[in-house]
Image (spheres, rainbow, N blue to C red):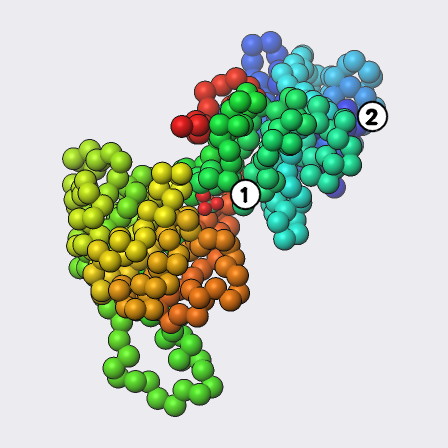
Amino acid sequence: MPWFSLEAFRGFTRYIYILQTKPGRERVKQRVQQPGAEVSAGGRAPAGREELHAAVGPGTEAAEGNRGCALRVPGNCSGLLPPGAARFICKENIVRKEPVQINSLVVIEAMSEKELPGLLILDIGGTYGVQENIVALLKKHFCLITMKEFLENKKEMSKKIQSVFVSECRPTVDQELLESLPNLKVIGNSGVGVDHLNLKMISNFGVKVTNTPHAVADSTADIGMALMLASARRLVEGSQIAISPHTKYFAVDWLGVEVTRATLGIIGMGRIGYKVAQRARAFEMKILYHNRKQRRKEEEQAVGAHYCEKMEDLLQQSDFVMLVVNLTPENHKMIGKKELGLMKPTATLINIGRGALIDQDALVEALQNNVIRAAALDVTYPEPLPRDHPLLKLNNIIITPHIGTATVQAIQMMAEEAIANMLAVLNGQPIPSEVFPK
Ligand SMILES: O=C(O)[C@H](O)CO
């Protein structure tokens, strides 16, 4: 039950104000996030000082009582406030126990719905749309416009849209879309990989691109470890044996291999690669890595990683090779027949980057002919693979449906990081994670 109506705030999506009981004394900031939102209790002054529990604006009807207050002491008012007065507040003064008049109400920020920057998203919910909890986050800062709404009313909507939230590569940002959004400032990609965006073309439109490298790091490193362990111990196959109606006994010669103390070769020692190394260290793995740039000595020592300037050296020595790089035109199919041939016949290839890093035809051949032991892929090209793709017919492979960041926590953090990036661009502030065209 609201203890006063918030007519004064209707139509506003964000309303931050400061109340001052007496000039120079306690100030309490409050925030109303949604139009007509309920405010049940206000901010609190520091302990031992006066407390303000809620505030209302001109024309606001105040119901009696102090429901929702942290301290229930008498002190209340009711009635319709005179326009322009902004004078009522349920004020609790532990000493006086009386309502007092507010000396000033300073509106420091009030944004109406129409003033929130327009953000284009594919859709809300459904197969490809933004999930409801993420929608709620985005709505605090943006006026959301779905692709359908945009297409139905292009003339009006195109002017409003200042940013596009790209999640799971959607919506597609192509020339046609860019041409139809004259006020577009930023593409906020939810995720670290931006291979689905034409950075040069977007930049030519004067539009910035941002990504979320921090939010994705833990969950993606975890899936790398999960795939490595699952492949080493043949978890998926084992599960099928355990639950099959045809299983009569468990064969004693059905064996996996150990991750512990094996050699892991990480290709791409960025934020995610380094987190994989930190995890692998707990398995006493010997860690090799190949990267454009060698990490600092202290960073190498912290995880016991050895730099291989040549990828070939890493491929020849590793029991597990993990791809943790972003896809670029330069590293397309970086693992092909030749590279697979350099790997140990007992080695496993893991890919948590992008499918096109691997020449999949060469991988099929290598797995069929036991050139390598196994593969574990969170990413393929395309996704999903056509149902008759030869990779799907092999026993020595695990494929997961691009779930590196598919956790409740990661998608929330990705949205938060994307929001921070987009707001920074719109407010002309330093951009936490901008992606530049090469
Ligand atoms: O790029 C990423 O961060 C993941 O693949 C999710 O899109």
Q: Nearer the viewer, mark 2 or mark 1?
A: 1
Please state the horizontal and vertical placement of residue 101, each as a whole percent of the image.
70, 16
Reply above or below: 360 against 311.
below
Q: Residue at x 49, y 27 (%)?
A: 200
Mark number displayed over residue 85:
none
**Residue 380 lies in quadrant:** bottom left
Mark earlier in primary sequence (2, 1)? 2
Q: CA distance from mark 2 to mark 1?
A: 53 Å
Which secondary structure lies at badge 1? loop
Q: Residue at x 74, y 17 (%)?
A: 86
Please state the horizontal and vertical placement of residue 226, each as a whole percent of the image.
36, 59
Please state the horizontal and vertical placement of residue 242, each as a whole percent of the image.
40, 80
Left or right: residue 319 compared with residue 229: left
Left or right: residue 391 compared with residue 129: left
Q: Is mark 1 within 8 Å of ligand 1?
A: yes
Q: Amino acid at mark 1?
A: Cys
**Residue 290 lies in quadrant:** top left
Which of 38/411 is in front? 411
Q: Is the residue under label 1 in contact with that under label 2 (CB below 8 Å)?
A: no
Identity of the residue furthest to the top in this view: 23
Which of 193/10 is in front? 193
Reply above or below: 134 against 92.
below
Mark 2: give few (<14), some (14-19) or many (20+) Cα within 10 Å: few
Mark number displayed over residue 79:
2
Q: Amino acid at mark 2?
A: Gly
Identity of the residue furthest to the bottom in this view: 248
- Residue that carries the numbered disc 1 in the rendered image: 169
